Amino acid sequence: MRTPDPASTTGPDRRTGLAVPLAVGAALAVGAGQAEAAPRPGSGAPHAPRLETVATFDGAMPTGVTVSRGGRVFVNFPRWGDDVPFTVAEIRHGKPVAYPDREINTPDTAAPERHFLGVQSVVVDAADRLWVVDTGRVEWADAPYGGPKLVAVDLAADKVVRTIVFPASVAGPRSFVNDVRFDLVHGFAYLTDATPDGPNGLIVVNLATGESWRRLDGTPSTMPVPGFVPTIDGRPMLNRPDGASAGTPIGIGVDGIALSPDGEWLYYCPLSSRRLYGVRTRDLTRHRKTAIQVHDLGVKGMSDGLETDRAGRVYAGDIERKAIVRRDTDGSYHTLVRDERLSWPDTFSIGYDHKLYVVANQLNRQAAYNGGTDLRRKPYVLYRLPIGSGPARR
């Protein structure tokens, strides 16, 4: 596979020191103890964009957000232990309302293909349909067959129009399908499997046939960095479910995902890492398992979600710094905003109002990471900020 064209406006740029193509199996991951430079402050703007509150949540903790062409806002609530009366919601008059109805949000494991069990992400595509990413897992129990799936909802009729169930060979009982991006022009969807049980990898779906397959399973770019321990709120974040535990590193693999406006590049990152990676989508959609070149695109900070705008820029959280960073098309990173209110910036979505939406959900303050004590302080908040560009949906 050839090196990307340095004149490309959307793909990786070899002019940046870290945007070097590396073959799968090469040592892509950076050790947890190695120094990594934070993205530099943004330039050219006299003031950072201000965060605007869109909605607050006094109940369950949200993770995902997406915005339709008409400005409708949808969120989801994973079933991780909070009281979750519905796992997908539309924001109406500032409050979450079960969507498309209460019945489908009932976690009925006897008919998993017809119900939302544990939704991790919601994404509106270029055809203005809402797609629901269901892990199929309720409070980390094994997913039944029919649980891990993609579900499309017609926003004009507010009804489910398609369900794509993943076979066990693609998303099994311990998988954790996390996020998705769509290319309706070429007819593919791309998902991440962030399971802490491994292996981590990418999932590709042929939208015409519903067939799906895995790519980059267990490779350095999709797996957590060994021994990775981030510092958040001034202390190391570790798995520490009780006060007697010394804590262990949190190993979460490929999580965030974004697609370039031309559909040629897929960007992704493990949660337990500070690096961004890119791969050509044509290498993922081939049925033959050929060698895939992965491109290390440098340090962006520890991120959960990713998003791209129409100009080809990539947005990511920098969880440790309570910041949002942007990778420009020349490969440089800039801090877009840094604010104490951005406690765990989770999922991103870009609206047609040219604003970036982000959920701040205090995920690191859950009891599992703090000796059994829940340190989260409600409300959780959905913010937005102007970015001067629209979504890269295609």
Image (cartoon, helix red, strand yellow):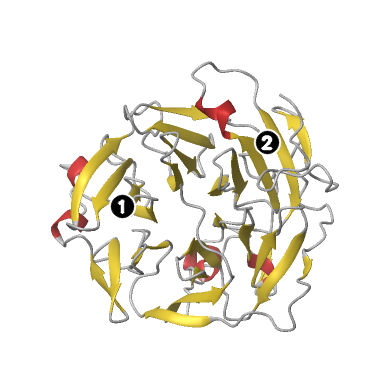
Q: Please report the residue visible at 76 percent of the width from the left and 44 percent of the height from the top.
A: 13
Question: Residue 46 at what x, y percent from top left?
Answer: 75, 83
Asked whether, in this view, residue 368 is left or right of residue 135, the answer is: right
Measure the C-alpha gap from mark 1 to mark 2.
Answer: 34 Å
* Nearest to the observer: residue 278 or residue 361: 278
Of the numbered discs in the image, which one, if any, rests on residue 384?
Answer: none
Mark 1 neighbour density, 10 Å: few (under 14) some (14–19) many (20 or more):
many
Q: Which residue is mark 2?
A: 220
* Nearest to the observer: residue 68 or residue 322: 68
Kindly identify the amino acid type of the residue bearing the numbered disc 2: Pro
Q: Which residue is mark 1?
A: 129
Question: Which quarter of the figure has residue 326?
Answer: bottom right
Q: Please report the residue visible at 71 percent of the width from the left and 27 percent of the height from the top.
A: 25
Q: Please report the residue visible at 49 percent of the width from the left and 76 percent of the height from the top.
A: 383
Question: Residue 51 at what x, y percent from top left?
Answer: 55, 81
Q: Is residue 72 above or below residue 327?
A: below
Q: Please report the residue visible at 56 percent of the width from the left and 33 percent of the height from the top.
A: 281
- Label 2 sits on a secondary structure element that is loop
Question: Residue 60 at what x, y percent from top left?
Answer: 35, 71
